[in-house]
Image (cartoon, helix red, strand yellow):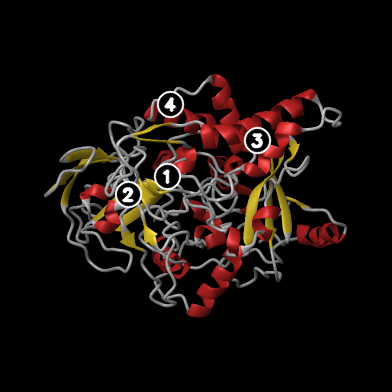
Amino acid sequence: MRPFSSFVLAAAALLCGGSVAASVGEEYGWWGPGQEGSFPAVADYPNAEGTLRTLLVGAPVETADHPFFAPIGPSGRACITCHQPSDAMGLSVETIRRRWEETAGRDPLFAAVDGSNCPILPQDRRESHSLLLDHGLIRIQRPWPPRDGADRPVDPDFDIEVVRDPWGCNSGSEYGLRARQPSISVYRRPRPVANLKYLTAVGFAYDPKQGLPLPRDPETGELISGNLMADGRAGTLHGQIRDAAPTHLEFFDEMSREQRLRIIDFETRIFTAQYRHRIGGRLDDFGAQGGPDVLARSEPGQLGSIGRAVWSEFEAWENIPADAPISAEERAFKQSVARGARTFRERTFLITDSAGINSPIGFGNPVRNSCVFCHNMTMMGNDVAPGQVDLGTTNLPFADPAPHLPLFRITCRRDPHPHYGRVILTHDPGYALTTGRCADVGKITLQSMRGLSARAPYFANGSATDLRAVVDYYDRRYDIRYTEQEKQDLVNLMSVL
């Protein structure tokens, strides 16, 4: 194990008001399970668009024997394996590929359980791990028939068939619908575990997408935000840990409450965002409020607020003084970011046939609004209103071609889906694998928009390889017809988040 020698430098840097360069582990900042040291209060990590900064607020965290960092289970994995500080507490394809090359595929990241396309494949071959290496996807195995967020059996109102199974995890005798314990395997991006006070904030006491009261945490009685997991299968951080331990870590003993509390304490004190841009320089100058500091110091009353304009922290760049000592290129970039913030909020278009928006209770179909209709949380861009939305990224005909992913045929037993009819073709049924409802096929929980430059690719299924592909998908899906300038402004905005 490589000691955290750079943390000695970290302490000196922080005392001098500086930050820590990412020199832990490999040169790009890889944190391996079992490394010992003190997690730095401030650490900077380079990426293609500039520099990401990660903050740990409050008391230091010693990683030795800490349940977030300690390897448990047969593969030697830890939570840190798939939630890397250099990748905004998520995982980028660039990092994944480097680990494969440096370890010849033997890193615990590539464990057969979900780091390969299917455990039945020969694990020493690159093609057996192509979904992780090429698209950043982890295998998620869900039971069939479904079980809800409280692990109770659900009687689904639809049938599911396997149309295409390129890796054998949905139609074989060990995995899939014909296995002794039937299941569905889908493939998704790891979700970042940072800035969690926003993701757990509750903006409404009910789910406006369903017209139902929010569920409550059975342990605390507190309302559950609904913004944690892609398919809503766990509504609390305790539930997320209980779900991840036996699946991703293959740790089948129950984690103690004390272990879970230590993980949650660490996760809820981590804040991360882009801090510098390769062209735009610092993101907190000339009145702007970029970087993770503003996320960490915000007051609870600001969480979940839609009163303050989303991304307004960059609007100061519209009026940079004429005599400001910056290059023309930096000025133009910053002004582009400011325009992108306004385009994000003010450029309206018709949103059509999107469950969770246009149905079930419905805001109308179509409804005219802008990106902030769903990405409305101040300083974060996730959804104040809890619940899942189908953007079409996994359901045909809207989904991009994905021959590398399984394809399922959903047949609604009772009422047809409000937008697709009685039969749906999908790469990932999403929220429907938790609720068992045909109307929820393809719905996915929206993610936060911070640290995007550090964790490509995008969307739950990794279908957008870069930020331009994200903009192009929305433009195509909703026939927005952005100008080329608007597209570039939006890309520039997302690159500094």
Q: Nearer the viewer, mark 2 or mark 3?
A: 2
Dot label at residue 430: 2
Rendering coords of residue 10 (x, y %): 79, 59
**Given contact means CB atoms under 8 Å apart, are the residues at marks 4 and 1 in contact?**
no
Mark 2 neighbour density, 10 Å: few (under 14) some (14–19) many (20 or more):
many
Q: Nearer the viewer, mark 4 or mark 3?
A: 4
Mark 4 — residue?
480
**Given contact means CB atoms under 8 Å apart, are the residues at marks 2 and 1 in contact?**
yes
Left or right of residue 389: residue 11: right
Rendering coords of residue 497 (x, y %): 62, 43
Q: Secondary structure at mark 1?
A: loop
Mark 3 neighbour density, 10 Å: few (under 14) some (14–19) many (20 or more):
few
- Disc 4 marks a residue whose amino acid type is Ile
Dot label at residue 194: none
Dot label at residue 460: 1
Q: Quadrant of the N terminus?
A: bottom right
- Disc 3 marks a residue whose amino acid type is Ala
